[in-house]
Structure formats: C-alpha cells, structure tokens
Amino acid sequence: MNRQPGALNLITDVPGLSVGNAHDERLRSGVTVLIPDGDMIASVDARGGGTGSREFDLLRPEATVQSVNAIVLSGGSAFGLDAAGGVMAALRDKGIGYRAGAAIVPIVPAAILFDLNNGGDKVWGSESPYPTLGRSAFAAAAGDFTLGNAGAGYGANAGGYKGGLGSASVLVTDDGPTVGALVAVNAVGALTHPVSGAFFAWDSEINAEFGGILPVAEDRGSAVRMPKLSGPGENTTIGIVATDAALTKSQCRQFAVMAHQGLTRAIRPANTPFDGDIVFGVSTGMRPLLDPARELAVLGAHAADCLARAVARGVFEAESQSDSVSYREKFGFPCPTR
C-alpha cells in the first residue's frame, strides 16, 4: 500500500474539503467543522456506550437525503450539539442547504465529546456558547488548520495525556484517490506502550509525524490500563474519514466501519461503556470507482491506517494544560511541529 501523505498531511488534502476550528480558552472547549465545496455523501458508524449525536437517522443508507452540507465535531457533551445550529445558520445565510420549496434547510450532522469536568468555566447561564463557536468555526474554514489544542480537541484529555485534534492523509496511488482523517481524541483507553512511550499506532507512522518512538521488548504484555475515575459517557473519540472517490451512502457506511479499526489499533481499549466513539465516512464524489467492491476495501484499509495516525498526531501535537500533561512534555519533545 502506498505510504505517501498529501501535501498538508491533513483531511483537507482530499479535494473539495475545508476545516474550521474555534475554541474558548476560559470555557476550555471548542468546535471543529468539516465543510465541502459542493455535495458530500456521508454515513456513520457509532460504537461504545456513551454516544452523543445529531441527524444520524438521515445518514442511514435508506434515508432520502443523500448529501450533507457540513459535519460538526464539538466538545461540551450534549450542550455541544448546539454548535450545529450555529453552522446551520451560517450555511442558510449563504443559501446552502436542502431545498424544500422556498425553505432552505442545511443538513449538519454532529457528534460530541465530554469535556465538562476539565477545569474550564462551564457556568454560561441561559445562553449556550456553542452556536457562536459553531459560527466562528464555519467562518474560519480553510485548507490548512491547527492540530492539538484546537477546535473540538481544545479541552480533550486522552489516556493519561492532554488530548487533541488530529488529522492525516494518504495518496492511495500517484494518480488515484486521496484518503484523509480528522479526529478529536478524548479517549479513556491508553494510547501508548507502557515502557517506551511508543504510540500503539507506531507501525502506521509516516515520516516521524508523531515522534518516531518505537516499542521495546519490555512493552510486551497487557496494554489494558483504565483510569479509575472515569465515568459513563465522560470520554469519547469522534472522527471523520474522507475520500474523493465516488461512494454511495452504503459505501460510505462500509468505509466508516472499516476505518473504525483504526481507533481500536490506536486506543486500547476503545468502544468501552465509558466512550461514545463515532466515525463518519464521507465522499466528495470526484473519482468514479472502476471496481467498486475491491476499491472500497482498499480505501477502507487506508482509512483505518489514516485514522490511527490522526489519533496519535492529535495527542502528539497537543500542549499541556493546568490539569493535563502533554505527550511531548512527558517525553521531552520540542514545541509542536504545526
């Protein structure tokens, strides 16, 4: 399999996509939005015991609406679902959305993670800050964007480290489709081997993108390490895998299912009763498939690889906050590479 990332090593290497981030330092939470230039077919695979979501029924393959106008990843637990309302308002202002007669209804699925107990000021009164953060993230959308303490990953914690926003991409062939991943990592499970500190995703790494540390013999044995203070629904890893290959909704669903293996490779354990792990699968539909079943299998394998890399990058690029130490600080790496 080809091992060459796109120019930015971000999900936006997939043609037709942009990403916007917004966060509030005092709140210690944020929002990330994925926006297509045109149509974007989408489906989803949700696992774990504490999922939080919006518009997931529309993503079922049999549902009538075929394309979505944006996808939101947000902190804030269920309050963060309000961020999709802010993105909807921004899209409607631009005349973008599902048209039903004179009405315009932007289709904006969303997934959330729990960051309410991270030390931020969550006493915001009767007006949730998340619609405004959603609008701000939409306005910031671009091809290049920040990883680590950014967007939905701003207030995240993961596996004993500061969590964060991660992304990665890969060129499937020199003249073929691109696959990319975007993820906010707030997992209860461990992300690294116990002795060396090597990420579980080390064997997917390209160009030392998350430090290049390799496991050692002493890392053998059980990797199951569960923090004692986690509670149901208080963690979660939420992500998106994307391609410019032309996929149907059913194929996007299978794409997301295969990609979810990337979470189980990068986080141990994943999909627990404490997590609400969610992976969206999206297609910008620019490259028709000649051999749909075989090519979908290849795309899904790349998506799992990409998502595992994105998880590790999200934690590697994060910076310490008052109640959480970053991976780079613990292992003596310099400032973020991005």
Image: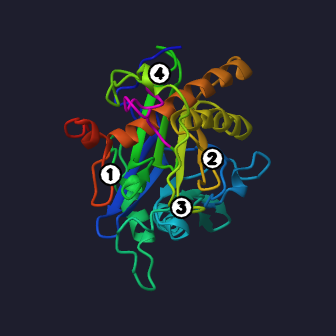
Alpha carbon of mark 3 to alpha carbon of mark 4: how far? 29 Å
Q: Quadrant of residue 7?
A: top left
Q: What residue appears at the point 32 percent right and 60 percent down from the top-left corner?
A: 323
The magenta segment is: 190-203
What type is the residue that disc 2 sits on?
Answer: Asn
Horizontally, residue 89 falls left or right of residue 299, namely left
Residue linked to disc 2:
271
Horizontally, residue 72 falls left or right of residue 5, namely right
Residue linked to disc 1:
149
Label 2 residue SS: loop
Alpha carbon of mark 2 to alpha carbon of mark 1: how far? 23 Å
What type is the residue that disc 4 sits on?
Answer: Asp
Horizontally, residue 226 falls left or right of residue 48, namely left
Mark positioned earlier in the residue sequence (1 or 3): 1
Q: Of residues 152 and 163, which is closer to you in this image?
A: 163
Of the two numbered discs 1 and 3 in the rendering, the one whose residue sits closer to the viewer: 3
Residue linked to disc 4:
203
Task: Tell me the tag on residue 234.
Answer: 3
